[in-house]
Image (cartoon, rainbow, N blue to C red):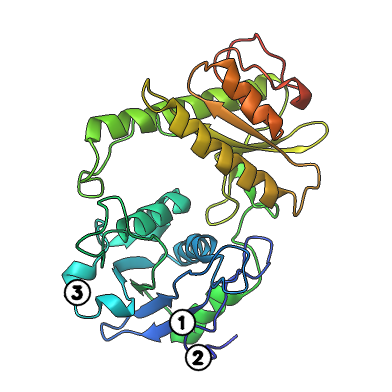
Amino acid sequence: MRNPGASQLRTTDVEGHELDAGFAVLGDSDGGFALVLESRSGRSGSDSERNPDYFAALTRILALLGSADAVLNDATVDSSRVQDLSLSERRIPLTYPVRLAKVDNFNGLRTEITSGQRPIGRGPNAKKSGGNNHKRLRLTFSIPGLNGGLDAVTDLLTAAVPVAGSASGFVPYKEANEAPEVNIERSADLDRERRERGLAGHAATQNALAERVREAGLTPESPESGGFECDIASDSAVSRVVGEVKSLTGLNVTRQIRMGLGQALHYRHDARHSHANAEAILAVEREVDQYWVEVCAEVGVALTWPPEWPNLERFGIPPGLPA
C-alpha cells in the first residue's frame, strides 16, 4: 500500500483489524522520516469521536518499527496551538535516541510518550495535573540500511499482518523485572524511590501470579509487543483469562483498585472480540478489604492477591497454596 496522503493511513492490530487512528509518513530533512499521528478528540461513542484508537495505534506503530530496528530520534507535540513554541518546548521528555529493537514493553514506551505530552501547550491557569494525553504528534525516526524509502515504511505500517510471534497476540510469559531503575529524566515529577518501589511491587506480584498459574497446570502468557494490552493472560479449562496487576501502598489502595478494575474490564471487553467467554482478574500486591472483592465481583472480575490467591477457583486455580 502506498501513502495516499496526509493522515489517511491506518495501521492494524495483531489480528489484522484496522485501527481507527489516522497518520501520515513524511520525508525528513535528516534522511530519515517523520510520522504524524493525528489527535484523538470527541466524546467516546459519539458521532463526533475522532481517532478513537489513538493509543492502540501508537503502541502498534512503535512495535512494527521496532521489528525493523528503527530508532526514535525525536517526539514533539505538533498541534496548531503549540506552533509558536520552540522545538525544545514542544519536545516530549525521553532519553533520545531510542532504539526500538531494544524496547521490551512498547505499551510502556507509549505511556511515556502520551504522559509526557500533557504539560506541553497547557494554559497558564490550567491545573498542574491537567493537559490531555492524545495530542497531534510528530515522531522522527531513522532505519539503518532501509531499502525502499517511504514506500517501504508505509507498507510495514499498513500491512494487515501481525508482528512475528503468536498468531493470538500472546507469547510465552516474560518475567517482569523486580529490580527496576527509574530514569530520573523521564520521571522528573515523581519521587524516584517511590516509583521504583511501585514498579518492583508490581513485577513481584505479576511473577508470583505467573508461578501460581503454572502450579495449577496452566500456561501463563504475556501480550505480544504492540498487541493486546494486559499484564498477564492464560487459558483456563473454560475461558480465556486476562489480568491486570497493581502494586499497593497504605495510601493508594482506593485509587489503584479503581484504576485496575477499569483496566481489567477494558481488557475483558477487547478479549471477547476473539474469545466470547473471556474473563478478567485483578491481582493486587497484598490482601485488601472484602468490600473490594464484592465491588469487583459485581462486574464479574476476580480480585486476588498473594500468597493465598483467593477467588480464582472458577479458572482452575485453587486457593491456599504457596505462590
Specify whether 27 is left or right of 95.
right
Tell me which amino acid carries mark 3. Answer: Leu
Tell me which amino acid carries mark 2. Answer: Gly
Placement of the N terminus among the 4 image quadrants: bottom right
> What's the CA distance linking mark 1 and mark 2?
7 Å
The residue at which mark 1 appears reads as: 24
Q: Position of residue 268 (x, y in %)?
A: 68, 44
Nearest the camera: 31 or 266? 266
How many numbered markers are drawn? 3
The mark found on residue 5 in the picture is 2
Element on which disc 1 rests: strand
Q: Position of residue 290 (x, y in %)?
A: 59, 16
Can residue 14 be seen at all in this image of the molecule?
Answer: yes
Residue that lies at the very extreme toward the front in this rendered image: 125
Give the quarter of the image for residue 162: bottom right
Specify whether 68 is left or right of 270.
left
Tell me which amino acid carries mark 1. Answer: Ala
Q: Position of residue 60 (x, y in %)?
A: 52, 62
**For mark 3, does the 10 Å Cα neighbourhood hold few (<14), some (14 to 19), or many (20 or more) residues?**
some
- Please report whichever mark, 2 or 3, sits nearer to the chain's N-terminal start: 2
Say which residue appears at 72% left-offset and 15% top-offset: 318
> What's the CA distance linking mark 2 and mark 3?
25 Å
The residue at which mark 3 appears reads as: 87
> What's the CA distance linking mark 3 and mark 1?
20 Å
Residues at discs 1 and 2 in contact (Cβ within 8 Å)? yes
Residues at discs 3 and 1 in contact (Cβ within 8 Å)? no
Placement of the C terminus among the 4 image quadrants: top right
Vertical side of 192 occupied by 162: above or below: below
**For mark 2, does the 10 Å Cα neighbourhood hold few (<14), some (14 to 19), or many (20 or more) residues?**
few
Nearest the camera: 57 or 262? 262
Vertical side of 180 occupied by 150: above or below: below
Q: Position of residue 81 (x, y in %)?
A: 29, 77
